[in-house]
Amino acid sequence: MKVICILLDSLNRHFLPAYGNDWVKTPNLDAFAERSVIFTQNYCGSAPCMPARRDLWTGDWEFLWRPWGPLEPWDNPLPKLLRQAGVLTQLITDHYHLLEQGGENYHVDFEGWEFIRGHENDPWITDPVPEPPHRGPRRLGRYGRNMSRLQREADFFAPRTLQAAADWLERNHSHENFFLMIDEFDPHEPFHVPPPYDTMYDPDWEGEPYFWPLYGRWAEMGDTEGDVQHIRAQYAGKVTMVDRWLGRVFERLDDFDLWQDTAVIVMTDHGHFLGEHGWYCKPSCPQYQTIAHTPLMIHLPGGKRGGERIDALATTVDLYPTILEWFGLEPPRPVHGRSLVPLLEGQVEKVRDYALYGWWGESVNYTDGHYTYLRHSVRADNSLLDAYSVRWSTAPWWELPDITDRVEYGSFMPQTEMLVGRMCFRPEEMERIHIWLQEVCRSSLLFDIRADEAQEHDLAGTALEKEYEEKLRAALREVQAPEEQFERLGL
């Protein structure tokens, strides 16, 4: 068995023709969709970047227990289990968070890994180069220095990463079993692209380049509707550039007839605000469908069920047991994920009744595919929230004051009998671990996403909310969520 998992970071489903877009050019992904199963109700789980990858690597939702951080000792990482079973494993990525503090051990269990330098704030180039021009208040900083190495399209990050993956397939296609993880940081911001992509969707733009907005409400930062249109155009240009170089990977599948015995997953970790609901990027705000409702396409060996759409619920943690099952393996212990294999083979109509998703410290969200319920903290300061870990020396929060004196150890995690550290965060500390306590929405929200995908009509406060309040409570009990989650959510 051969499996290729392609994660395209921050991929907004509304920019894909396979999901109804009529103006962004993605011919390679369009062709891939025709030979793949298309999931119409796939949801992110834990977000953003590293929490989503822990969901994928371990099959468990992270966001109820912990913010952004490395793998824990009780985890059974996917590449480790596959390698122990004799499967060749390879990671090719330009996602620098995988190797920095807070994500430094996600690559270690692969037999081989290749890292493409320079994306976003990757500390790569120190040359004293002039700050490139860029519209707006954001300074480019490290990325501005890294830009000095981007002289042609092939120098950019998606081209380098996807070409490296294509080259790896050319050299390694003859292995009987392999798992290739392609973790491509594009189309994540900054939406910096070379010609012709920079003018492809907004040819009339005038003035300085603008490809990296601040997180927040675009109107409050002084942007106009024309600016929003341009940011969307730059993002679309990046999607098209990614698609072009993804074609190199698909060409290797053609060259070596790998479509016959290889499962190929195209996925993302979460969506991205590009003006929707008045927001840019991934700020502290309600996790609307733009962020939560994500694309997922799976090519089955031989192209079985190519072009079919599956409306059953799926979420990131489900890919962990799915990939294991393809290799004849099972998770070493129960996980939150549910294998999609019976669904893909037409044996069942669904594998789950609900999905949970969210950011640690923000709302806890529940969907059954018909309605989605965003439950916010009932406490004005969002206090009473613990984090659980034994990685206090390497996680991003390790520099918090008197942390070693505040950690209590006990048997707190349902996933392990190991003694685990628990620490309650003070409200003033939340911002230091990427939780911005803006007064954006501290009320719960409820939407009928079948009739109201744009989420314009809030049903919270109606009799229906009581029903979904109970469904969320039952789901949290089923996954054995920490008791303080019930308290902070008023459940």
Image (spheres, helix red, strand yellow):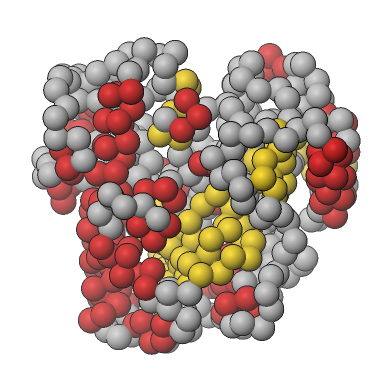
Q: Quadrant of residue 81?
A: bottom right
Query: Would residue 375 be visible to someone looking at this image?
Result: yes
Residue 19, how many percent across, how many down?
42, 57
Q: Quadrant of residue 396?
A: top right
Foreground of the two, 316 or 156: 316
Residue 196, how many percent across, how many down?
12, 44
Residue 6, how many percent across, how many down?
41, 61
Left or right, residue 62 beside residue 192:
right
| Position of 452 relative to 145 (above/below) | below
Left or right, residue 262 beside residue 385:
left
Q: Quadrant of residue 280?
A: top left
**Residue at 51% in and 52% down:** 294
Quadrant (top left/top right/bottom left/bottom right) for the C terminus = top right
Foreground of the two, 158 or 205: 205
Q: What is the count of numbered marks?
A: 0
| Position of 325 relative to 121 (above/below) | below
Residue 42, how many percent across, how many down?
57, 57
Query: Would residue 126 be visible to someone looking at this image?
Result: no
**Residue at 61% in and 25% down:** 435
**Residue at 64% in and 16% down:** 439
**Residue at 25% in and 75% down:** 252
